[in-house]
Image: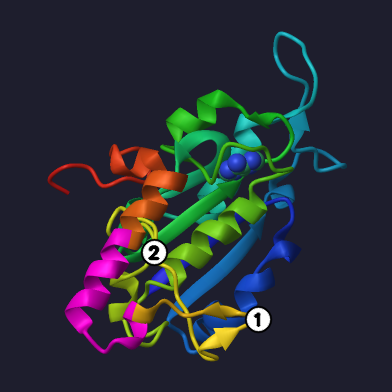
Amino acid sequence: MFRASILTLFPEMFPGPLGLSLAGDALTRGLWSLEAFNIRDHGLGRHRAVDDTPAGGGPGMVIRAEVRAAAIEAALPPPDDRPRLLMSPRGKPLTQARVRELSSGPGVAIVCGRFEGVDERVIAARGLEEVSIGDYVLSGGEIAAIVLLDACVRLIPGVMGGAASHAEESFENGQLEYPQFTRPRDWEGHAIPDVLLSGDHARIDRWRRQESVRLTRERRPDLLDGGPGGKVAGE
Ligand code: ADE
């Protein structure tokens, strides 16, 4: 079973939206599990301090290495062969290919950052893999962790009906998905493209492939070049 363990200062944020809809049903059905651990439990002193000022000066606060390490040791007693991710805007961009890999493995342990960051020494010493969900800055890693888990959980066998529909999705073949339509045939003067009503499946497939390429070229030319979310030759 896919097991997710989250280390956070805000365990109340979980399961959050992952407790509803597809992911929530799958959680209830035992297709995956989620545990959130409070880093504050390993804070220092009477005030359970978790952070301190950055060495060398500067704004913000940094999570202390020994607090972070103690939280990791308590939440992930060995043996634990799950990838240890640290959500951070500094990380490698998350791709559908990485999501597919993670979702077919034993699960993930996710460390959520807050403040200015985490002491760099603990990242290397505890083998944390930094992952970003995009080139913008969130106020913490929790929402990024929810995004990553949502993407992984929907790929777990049995979570979504009709696994075949994954193959058609955006990014699964390195391109954006073609446009979809349904009834009514005419809506506010806009018609469904004739080809989709032709019943000629070879023509429909061809049209959809062309539309995928057109949209990808227009919106995400980096995918066609084998960029971060792109299809790398030979993959
Ligand atoms: N924490 C703050 N911003 C983030 C981002 N863009 N991706 C992952 N974690 C983050």
Residue 188 got which mark?
A: 1
The answer to which of 137 and 62 lies nearer the viewer is: 137
Is disc 1 placed on a helix, strand or loop?
A: loop
Q: Quadrant of residue 190?
A: bottom right
The answer to which of 201 and 86 lies nearer the viewer is: 201
Crowd around label 2: few <14 · some 14–19 · many ≥20 (10 Å) = many
User: Compared with residue 70, is residue 207 higher up or lower down, i.e. above or below?
Assistant: below
Give the residue number, with chain letter if any, for mark 2: 177
Q: Main secondary structure of the magenta part?
A: helix
Percent x, y for residue 78?
39, 54
Say whether residue 204 is magenta: yes
Residue drawn at (12%, 46%), measured in percent from left and top? 234
**Start and end of the magenta stretch?**
195-210
- In the image, taking residue 223 as reference, residue 8 lies left or right, namely right
**Mark-to-mark CA distance, 1 and 2:** 24 Å
Residue 81 seen from this side: no
Percent x, y for residue 162?
33, 86
Q: Quadrant of the N terminus?
A: bottom left
- Can you tell me which quadrant of the image ligand 1 is in? top right
